[in-house]
Amino acid sequence: MTTPTTETPAAAATSTAFGWRFAGPLLLGSTLNPINSSMIATGLVGIGLGFHKGPGTTASLISVLYLCSAVMQPTMGKLATVFGARRVFITGLLILVLAGITGAAAPAFGFLLLSRALIGIGTSAAYPTAMALVRKRADETKAGVPSRVLGNFSIASQVTTVIGLPLGGLLAGIYGWRAIFFVNVPLALLTLALTLTGVASDKPSAREGREPLVTMIDLPGIVLFAGTIISTLLFLSHVKTPDWWELAAALVLGTVLVIWERRAGRPLVDVRMLGRNRPLLRTYLRQAVVSLGIYTAMYGTSQWMEQAAHYSSSQVGLIMLPLSAASIVIARVVSTRGWVRRPLVMTGICMLLTGATMLQITHSSPVLLLIGMSLLFGLANGFSGFANQATLYVQAPAEEVAIASGLYRTFAYFGAIFSSSLIGIAFGTKAGDGGLHTIAWVTLGIGMVSLLLTTLDKKIPAKVN
């Protein structure tokens, strides 16, 4: 006797439309940015020895990728609306191949900076174009909101961020630090081959009349956006010893950007649409706040465990393991159910519980309490990942989902970069219990803000189909 199926028409359409031939290369491509973000950490010492550079100089290899990614994510989304999402996705992979070769063969440190910049540019094409391709496929097949697919993107990003550190360590240990750059070549070529066979070609791109290309892509808007983002991120990266000219530059460039975009025929950032779409603006703000809280708590406590509690790097990795496991499990459950509002509420609650737990911790606390804190991190991360992404998906106009997705990642970078400044302010020259408790109060405040941003926002859907 067979059991009757309970699969809904929307679920059946999603299963058919988003098979692995289509979704696989998009998922793989979207992991290349987060994996490169963390993989480089294990090669910095070797790079410094090889080129006789100090830690401050080699750390620029991390920041240059963040800066390029923050600028290029929405820019690549804009290019996708003009030239086609698949074309831009493929172009990003080709840039990544060039970046991998440049870094692996680098004769001087400057070539490594160029390689990391190209990695940031190339990998930034993946996520916004993937979201555009998913939205296009969902609209064509009337599959509704592909919750499980969006959940897969959230999980893939979380997994690869964690995998990046051990993978980088393995590559650097066996083949040397150049392998950390060269590994991008086979990964990009594999993704390219899967894309060419599994993702349908874009329709021919047509220039409307004799409209100049500069106008179509809004080149002045891109330049102003880049200047605004870079000056803002540079200011946020060292607020303990601020360079006020960076803040002034950000305010001036941001003002000029808004004025220009209001008048542009094809703006990079449609400020008029954002002004009307307040729920989308709140989603961006919520993403930045949650990112700030999670990165501050995660990296701050990791540093504290090594310096104050005297755990080894491997022991810290094991203590933080529940973070990854909880994130993956929760993201899968939430995306399968299509829940949105409740997970966002739970994100704020988990961050409040995380801060409260951190306040009870000292360097002599039992390891089980630290594992419990790690678990709370993971719950907050898992609840927020899919829910914020799904909210963005339903709030962004279909024709601008690529740019909107790129901006979504840019706001996450704001939180990630500002977290390093908060950690520096809290700890000073060395991580101690007092600094950890300062981070705990910051986490409590961020949790409360996150909770208020959710509970007071009536436009957040309860769930998506």
Image: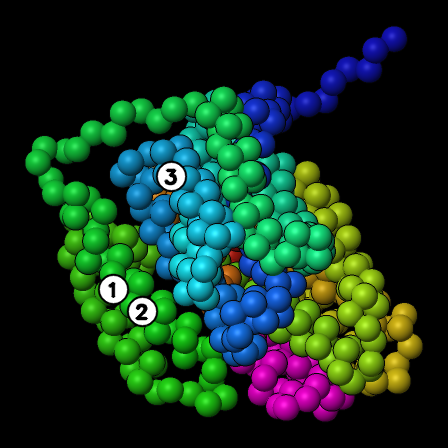
Q: Residue at x 72, y 44 (%)?
A: 333
Residue at the far top: name it.
1
Q: Give the amino acid at mark 2.
A: Thr
Mark 1, Cα crowd under 10 Å, few <14 / some 14-19 / many 20+, is many
Q: Which residues are magenta?
A: 420-449
Q: Residue at x 82, y 82 (%)?
A: 309
Q: Nearer the viewer, residue 87 or 278?
A: 87
Give coordinates of residue 182: x percent, y percent: 54, 48
Give coordinates of residue 463: x percent, y percent: 60, 44
Is 275 covered by the magenta stretch?
no
Question: Is 338 displayed left or right of 217 in the figure?
Answer: right
Q: Quadrant of residue 410?
A: bottom left
Question: Is 100 displayed left or right of 350 in the figure?
Answer: left
Tell me the number on the disc at residue 224: 1
Q: To which residue does mark 2 refer?
A: 228
* Depicted 233 relative to depicted 14: above or below: below
Residue 460 seen by the camera: yes
Mark 2, Cα crowd under 10 Å, few <14 / some 14-19 / many 20+, is many
* Depicted 57 relative to depicted 460: above or below: below
Mark 3, Cα crowd under 10 Å, few <14 / some 14-19 / many 20+, is some
Mark 1 and mark 2 residues within 8 Å of each other at the beta carbon: yes
* Depicted 217 relative to depicted 313: above or below: above
Q: Nearer the viewer, residue 300 or 448?
A: 300
Q: To which residue does mark 3 refer?
A: 91
Is 430 covered by the magenta stretch?
yes
Q: Give the amino acid at mark 3.
A: Thr
Q: Give the amino acid at mark 1.
A: Leu
The first of marks 3 and 2 along the sequence is 3
Give coordinates of residue 195: x percent, y percent: 49, 29
Mark 3 and mark 1 residues within 8 Å of each other at the beta carbon: no
In front: label 3 or label 2:
3
Question: Is 293 displayed left or right of 279 in the figure?
Answer: right
